[in-house]
Amino acid sequence: MTEVLTAAFLAGLLAAMLRMATPILFAALGECLSERSGVLNLGIEGIMFFGALAAFLTAYFTGSLPLAVAAAFLSGALLALVHAALVVSLGVSQHVSGLGLTIFSSGLALFLYRLIIGTPATPPQVAPFAVVRIPLLASIPFIGPVLFEQYALTYLAVLMAPLLGLVIYRTHWGLALRATGENPEAADAMGVNVFFVRYVSVVLGGGLMAVGGAFLSVAQFNMFLPGMVAGRGWVAIALVVFGKWRPGRIFLGALLFGLFDALQLRLQAAGAVLPYQYLLLLPYLVTILLLVAFARDPSYPGALLRAYRRE
Amino acid sequence: MRIRLEKRGPISFRARLALPFIAVAISFAFSFVLILLARANPFTAFYYIFYGALGSPTSLGETAVKTTPLVLTGLAAAVAFKARFYNLGGEGQLYLGALCAAVLGLHLALPRALAVPVIMAAGCAAGAAWALCAGMLKARLKVDEVVVTLLSNYIVIYIISALLDGPLKDPRTMWPNSPPILESARYPILIAGTRLHAGALVALAAAAAVWWVMKRSVLGFEIAAVGANPKAAGYAGIPVARTVVLTAIMSGGLAGLAGVGEVIGLHYDLVEKISPNYGYAGVVIAVLGGLNALGVVCAALLFGVLITGAELMSRYTGVPVFLADVIQGIVLLVMCAVFVFTQCRVRVTRRT
């Protein structure tokens, strides 16, 4: 294990950390947007899975990766619309509706994959996103390979965090969003259309979650696999709580998760002393520990889980 | 014109009873579209689902075998949801019960009358202990139980996978499964020629016990009160934290018992994929059954039919077997939508 602390190893580890954090970051930012308006979306796991399928199929049949990401976003938005209709308009339990959405979209994704692709001996692959080297910056020693040799979606995710922070804290719409999530009665009295704000946040949030799933199928694995989301949606929800509903802190949380995921992969590759399954469960365990250590009695958005009904 | 929902008074018992049937009918109608997409005849497909599940004594037995764990995971979710303790860790708790049953079943050389109850108790305790962790975290530290229970499922499944690769692996095979458990540690078969085992009776007894606890005992009253309004329950002198913890124990124990049945009643060894998401299906079943023990048994039976029949249906019509999963999701979504209309009526008013 002498090679562990070389600069090359560290650069590789940190680059992988950003890569592993990407899908989680998209998903967590989507969940953050949704929860800020007062709507928990447990459909996240299924939406990510369906987004992965939508992106894979689009890339498989058209060869266009931007189109694949767009298709994923659209599918996620549509699925989230179902959740919005149920919880915002009908006031259904957000837990139950979200879980129903996860079961529905996961089942539907498997159903459609089997229908369209069938059961070939080796799962078909797509030409994945290429790594984008940013000229000049990428040749800075150490920092270059870590920060400036990443997938386009990773850059997008990293930019998305401050962007969402800006929208939430610095725009008029962000104020309406926070008011809706904290106190819908007051927001309504202010003239905010609570229902509209919630619909928009849930739907856009769903789109982001699906893009996170798309990263898995068209960048990370370049194929569609049954268990590929593997609880990343649930981790994203945990990171939103850990991040106190603030995009900046959520970004840090995603990096931390990415670090452990990258670390366990490297330990696996190094033929570590432990069976690989114990390494695989490490990120989940760390996420739970993070919650216990830093997210006791979190201050949820005031109106989270509460349906709003105009009297 | 405006459409709005207004609260309405309580609806009749008969209308409430019709609810799940309406939800299932709407879900089946939705699934027609999917079957047509797969270029099959929906009526043929549904014929094969029901024929595959109920057409012969053997298939009836298979349906009962599939229904058994579903009753238990359904009860587990129903108890927890009643207290609004969102235990979504049924899958992991089931796996822990199964693990416990396999380890004891391999080594516990006792007569059956002693071995089986010991294994049942141990499996129950394992599932309960796992759920208790989440319950304590919620009751004492206010850590959200949803995420903790969901993530803990992955942890358990990886641990079991590691054990089946190592100390628990049957050295005589190359597959990740444990050696077969002792004869004396198995549930007896109820009807020769089928795989129907005594676990089915255990599940029914558990349903009766849950019914009694929820309707007749003080704990059941406290669970319902905490679920309805934890603050008010606290002011009324109900120990909220203790109730949540007891609910978690009950819920986890039931899920653990489901895992015990799969090992000592059905497989006789521990395999990696011992549960095809029975834990998650339990949530759907609990909601469809109205969080009520009798309702859970009926809903579990319906899902037992669906899961058993879907395999035959898939073989004969080419419709992917995942149809069963999609229907589960739709049932849950439709059920909660339909439920709204028992509490509210739609009023269309003209805007002036």
Image (cartoon, rainbow, N blue to C red):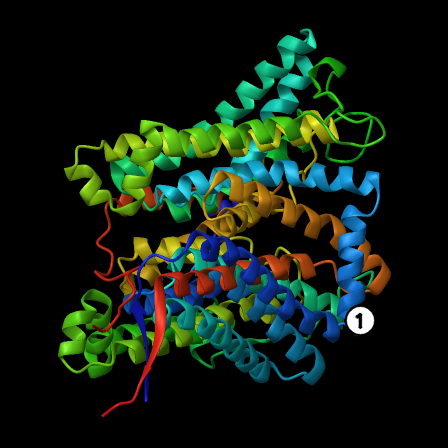
- A292 over A170 or under it: above or below: above
Residue B330 rendering spot, x and y as whole percentages: 56, 63
Asked whether A13 or B188 is in front, the reply is B188
Residue A87 rendering spot, x and y as whole percentages: 38, 66
Q: In the displayed image of the protein, which residue is found farthest to the bottom?
A: B352
Asked whether A116 or A224 is in front, the reply is A116
For residue B315, side relative to residue B266 (left or right): right
Residue drawn at 69 percent across, 52 percent down: B306
Q: Quadrant of residue A131?
A: bottom right
Q: Is residue A14 visible?
A: no
Q: How many numbered marks have been drawn onto this rendered protein structure?
A: 1
For residue B84, side relative to residue B307 (left or right): left
- A118 over B95 or under it: above or below: below
Asked whether B328 or B264 is in front, the reply is B328
Residue drawn at 67 percent across, 32 percent down: B262
Residue drawn at 62 percent across, 70 percent down: B30
Question: For the C terminus of chain B, which image quadrant?
Answer: bottom left
Disc 1: which residue: B40
Residue A130 rendering spot, x and y as whole percentages: 59, 76
Q: Is residue A157 visible?
A: yes
User: Element at badge 1?
Assistant: loop
Asked whether B170 or B311 is in front, the reply is B311
Q: Amino acid at mark 1?
A: Ala
Q: Quadrant of residue A140?
A: bottom left
Q: Quadrant of residue B230?
A: top left
Residue A188 rendering spot, x and y as whole percentages: 18, 77
Which chain is indicated by disc 1?
A: B
